[in-house]
Image (spheres, rainbow, N blue to C red):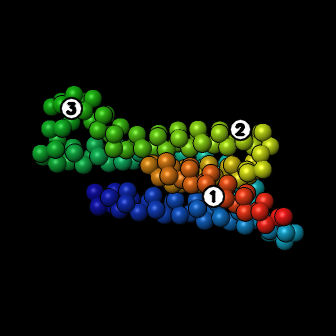
């Protein structure tokens, strides 16, 4: 049981930090490519791979937490009465949904909505975002988690508008 609690505590910060560092490396490689530096990027290392891996991680982590909760409750003499046959299975399902699954679904859903909005801006050829930047912001929204994505999305637009305005101002 101690091993499971260590995994559930330390796995998310380690995995999210690794994804962030990989995304930063991708960003540096893209920036170096524009500056004609000789940085090579591995074939499978791109923003889409990190996004798919992060979404899979959120789902697998929710599964791990759900099974861990069931195991913890079934192992304890008092909390065993919260599981079936003493309680309807719906109690455990709703508990798991609220504590382990809902945040992941909300984070992924809001991040997808934000990404599709950014893709519309890219398709309209706005000067604010490019395709790679939209994917990078989508990954950042996924990394920020729920409810952090609600703060991340408006802040991206505020800083993008400030950067665009300052570039326009200093260009003259």
Regarding residue 145, the answer to whether it shows in the image is: no
Residue at point 37%, 44% (across, down): 100
Q: What numbered label is drawn on residue 120?
A: 2
Q: Secondary structure at mark 1?
A: helix
Residue 57, image x, y percentages: 51, 49
Q: Which residue is mark 3?
A: 84
Q: Quadrant of the C terminus?
A: bottom right
Residue at point 22%, 28% (across, down): 88
Which one is nearer the viewer's eye here, 115 or 10? 115
Mark 2, Cα crowd under 10 Å, few <14 / some 14-19 / many 20+, is few
Residue at point 52%, 38% (across, down): 109
Q: Secondary structure at mark 2?
A: helix
Q: Secondary structure at mark 3?
A: loop
Looking at the image, residue 172 sits to the left or right of residue 16; the answer is right
Q: Which residue is mark 1?
A: 159
Task: Identify the mark nearer the N-term, 1 or 3.
Answer: 3
Looking at the image, residue 99 sits to the left or right of residue 105; the answer is left
Q: Nearer the viewer, mark 3 or mark 2?
A: 2
Which one is nearer the viewer's eye here, 114 or 159? 159
Q: CA distance from mark 1 to mark 3?
A: 51 Å
Looking at the rendering, which quadrant does residue 25 occupy?
A: bottom right
Q: Is residue 164 above or below residue 36?
A: above
Task: Identify the mark nearer the N-term, 2 or 1.
Answer: 2
Q: Nearer the viewer, mark 1 or mark 3?
A: 1
Residue 38, image x, y percentages: 84, 71
């Amino acid at each position: 049981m101690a091993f499971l609690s260590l995994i559930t505590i330390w796995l998310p910060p380690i995995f999210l930090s690794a994804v962030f560092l990989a995304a930063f490396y991708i960003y540096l490689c893209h920036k170096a490519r524009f500056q004609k530096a000789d940085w090579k990027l591995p074939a499978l290392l791109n923003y889409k791979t990190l996004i798919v891996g992060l979404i899979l991680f959120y789902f697998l982590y929710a599964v791990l937490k759900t099974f861990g909760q069931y195991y913890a409750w079934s192992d304890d003499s008092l909390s065993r009465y919260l599981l079936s046959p003493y309680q309807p299975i719906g109690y455990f399902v709703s508990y798991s949904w609220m504590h382990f699954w809902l945040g992941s679904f909300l984070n992924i859903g809001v991040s997808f909505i934000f990404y599709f909005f950014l893709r519309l801006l890219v398709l309209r050829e706005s000067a604010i975002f490019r395709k790679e930047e939209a994917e990078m912001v989508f990954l950042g929204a996924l990394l920020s988690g729920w409810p952090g994505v609600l703060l991340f999305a408006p802040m991206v637009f505020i800083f993008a508008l400030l950067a665009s305005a300052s570039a326009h101002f200093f260009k003259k």
